Amino acid sequence: MRYFFAVISIVFVLGCSPEPEKAVIEVKEGVTYVCNPRMHISEQRLIKETVFKSDDNSEFVFAEVSDIKEGPNGEVFIVDQQDNKIGVFSYDGEYLTSFGGKGEGPGEFEGVDCLDFFNDGNILISDVQNLRFQIFDSEYIYLDSVKRQFGSPGKFVIDSSGRIINRPVLIFFGVEDGDKTLLNVCDSDFNPVQGFGEVKEFNEPLMEFIMNNCYLALADNDRLCLSYMIENRICIYEDDKLLYDINRPLFFEQKKPEVKTEKSGDEISFITQFYPLCHDIDVDSKGNIYVLTVYIPPSEEIDFEQDGSFEMILEIFNSQGVLQKIIPVLDIMPTNLHIGKGDKIYLNDTNEMQVLRYAALDPN
């Protein structure tokens, strides 16, 4: 399950001003700000190699994929948030097993979100609605649970030292009272340490969640790359300090999200009007940053009820945040991205309920 519903009525198209040829780069107080120009979509295409899907003998369904990861031994792990299970496949796409299931007990999940691996091969999994992380060994046997002290666990990464960097589902207060940070950090023993990242504060909690919602990826050198769901912006952190602040050159203007309430009897529901621009982020072995996002052709009236009104694309930036290429994602509707060994690209397809692996791209 996703934690938001996207509804939009009108999108305003940006004016056709001349496009700069190169990114504008400026350094202020140790932070490099990169303003990327617009860029035509490349004629390069993704080349499909492997399909991961359910078969008659599979106990795993692709109802709502929330994460895809290659394991340390070559297996491919696919997290299904609706079925609350993790499916394990061979590198060649053969279904091997699954574990988890809906519930509150050990090894069970309510809103399983994502996973990552410790250096010893143990698997850490975020269990959102049960407000905990769960740990499994390399044979998928449950070991332990760690309750979150301040907010639900959400998307997270584990760095080379074993630190867990987590973007909680609910923005929380950091280790010190009043020290509000975007990302929460624990050491390998789950002891909280100082978080980092700026939080945009709003009076409405749901608006605060929307505007701070982001996706995380970790480069091989432990640089953390963060892309906001709504704001066209990527941040790169090194040693928990902001190093790069990068804009993404969108072709259309996003309406400012609105939050309103409707009351029916004793129930109050929140209706949020926005459209997510970023769906996921990852980094390849050379430090190039891939962002899975929405592309809407310029000078086109947007009809979100009709096929072809928008497409998914991969924006590829180099390690300094300069846009290199925009690749169209055709014939599928993905919400998750993973860059695996050899820089091969994994995307899920919500239409056909499957995951596909594509050949590596030349980002230059």
Image (cartoon, rainbow, N blue to C red):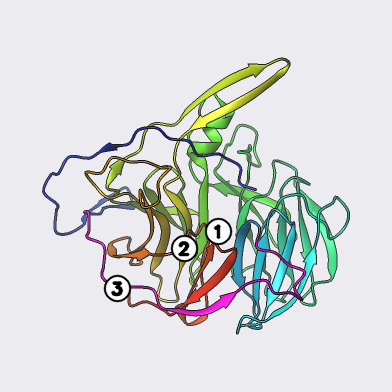
**Quarter holding residue 56:** bottom right
Residue flagged by tag 1: what amino acid is it? Answer: Thr
Q: Residue at x 67, y 71 (%)?
A: 54
- The Cα–Cα distance between marks 3 and 1, rounded to whole angstroms, is 23 Å
Task: Estimate the x, y position of residue 276 in percent, counting from the top left.
Answer: 45, 44
List the residue tagged with mark 1.
Answer: 350
Q: Which residue is mark 2?
A: 332
Return the x and y of residue 199 as percentages of the image width and height.
50, 38
Query: Of callouts 3 and 2, which one flags the residue occurring earlier in the amino acid sequence?
Result: 3
Residue name at image x 48 percent, y 58 percent: 333
Question: What amino acid does circle 2 point to?
Answer: Ile
Q: Secondary structure at mark 3?
A: loop
Marks 3 and 2, Cα distance to the nearest angstrom?
16 Å
| Marks 2 and 1 close (CB-CB < 8 Å) | yes
Packing grade of label 3 (10 A; few <14, some 14-19, many >=20) is few
Relative to 255, 220 lies left or right: right
Q: Residue at x 61, y 42 (%)?
A: 3
The range drawn in magenta is 37-62
Crowd around label 2: few <14 · some 14–19 · many ≥20 (10 Å): some
Note whether 221 is above or below 3 in the view shown.
below
Image location (x, y in percent) of residue 183: 57, 48
Q: Main secondary structure of the magenta part?
A: loop
Tell me the mark number nearer the camera, choosing from 3 and 1. 1
- Which of pointers 2 and 1 lies earlier in the amino acid sequence? 2
